[in-house]
Amino acid sequence: MFGLEAIDLARMQFAFTVSFHILFPAITIGLASYLAVLEGMWLKTRDDTYRDLYHFWSKIFAVNFGMGVVSGLVMAYQFGTNWSRFSDFAGAVTGPLLTYEVLTAFFLEAGFLGVMLFGWNRVGRGLHFFSTIMVAIGTLISTFWILASNSWMQTPQGHAIIDGRVIPVDWFAVIFNPSFPYRLVHMSIAAFVATAFFVGASAAWHLLRGRNTPAIRRMFSMAMWMALIVAPVQAFVGDMHGLNTLEHQPAKIAAIEGHWENKGDEATPLILFGWPDMEAEKTRFAVEIPYLGSLILTHSLDKQVPALKSFAKEDRPNSTIIFWSFRVMAGLGMLMIFVGLWSVWLRKKDALFTCRPFLYLTLWMGPSGLIAILAGWFTTEIGRQPWVVYGLMRTADASSNHSIGQMTFTLVMFVVVYFALFGVGLGYMMRLVRKGPKAHEDKINTGGPGTQRTPARPLSAAHEGTEEGHTDTLSKGH
């Protein structure tokens, strides 16, 4: 297929499936915490606007959660089907970590998800709020274990290699490997940022169409406050993460910067734009700012950053790709900060909900958080190459022994099925967003033949009853 080998197709298949999957957990993490905040504010203030927003976003959360579970199962199977040599080599570490994720996060979410989605009129206020908090905590615990596993592959420690296999000897060191704290915080904040702009774009869409209701205004205001707070924090965490990567994966940083060689004792410039040429070993059309590379990456004006030519050709990541994927992520991050600052200025002018250029910008920024997450993952994963476990196992040695024909067929099938299945799911979720929150929306299931019954699946929560006139028994303490 297009001159590609079986391992290239295996990498493309995993990249495709993980790119689809990561979108759903990112929004799930953010929405779970958002729902906890909404219900907490409703319990504290008894302002029905918070309750209406909770009901609205819980439906979207349910659809998103369901698609995230389905897409995640496929990735787990791929470790055995396409990357069996990796599983044989490192399964003693990655297997238990993923098992811990199931035993803690997934069971916690599964245990309280039903109460959260379907228990509004069936349990007391305290228990329902507790369930929402537990689901939110569960999403963060899941992030903890997934990032622990992936971070160990980036900066492995706490192990020994016996008979050609990795054996854990210090689980604390395995889990809390050098890059884990930075990557955990960076990914968690990225999920909150992505959700803030998703919520903000949804509200902007309604405001641009003249639906200036209290619920729409409230969710737009909350989204902009979140963007103002977390986007600058993410930039700071990203800088710390970059310093950690420079220490443990200098070749990745050199490739991100498109930096090929140091000249004498000169400080490293920052290449804003250019085209890294892996064959010619130089960055063409480079637009540089002197000293700024050293200042950003070493926090000094005289230290140099390692250059790509100081690494063997076979150990260099593909600079052409990650040079630009990183700039997409960083550029969107700066634009997010700008949106947050502009929102403050508009608040002072009492024009936050009426400034149409700002509303259009926020609408267009809706997918920006998800795009930035994808760009960041491409940067960190492609930047790890040619290693699947950095410094221990090369990607070329990790794949299963499949033919080109087998990998081509499965890749094509994945593309067709994913776009068909998740395209329908995403379309349905967008239809829910376009409906917007309803004032005094209540949830009730009367049960019995011919009436609504208790759903058994998370996706069913999107069909929960919303007829007008139902009594909100929870708000009355029943």
Image (spheres, rainbow, N blue to C red):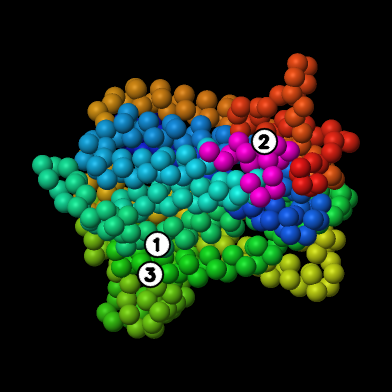
Q: Residues within 10 Å of mark 1 (few under 14, many from 20)?
A: some
Badge 2 or badge 1: first in the primary sequence: 2
- Label 2, label 1: how many angstroms apart (C-alpha)? 35 Å
Badge 2 or badge 3: first in the primary sequence: 2
**Looking at the rendering, which quadrant does residue 361 occupy?**
bottom right
Name the residue type under label 3.
Answer: Leu
Name the residue type under label 1.
Answer: Pro
Rendered position, 468 above or below 287? above
**Looking at the rendering, which quadrant does residue 91 occupy?**
top left
**Looking at the rendering, which quadrant does residue 116 occupy?**
top right
x, y percent for residue 327: 50, 60
Name the residue type under label 2.
Answer: Phe
Per the image, the residue denoted by label 3 is 243
Numbered badge on residue 181: 1
Magenta-highlighted residues: 111-127
- Label 2, label 3: how many angstroms apart (C-alpha)? 45 Å
Q: Is residue 306 left or right of residue 355?
A: left
- Please identify, in this view, whether the residue under mark 2 or under mark 1 is nearer the observer: 2
- As for residue 115 lying within the magenta part, the answer is yes
Per the image, the residue denoted by label 2 is 118
| Viewer-closest of 208 and 267 | 208
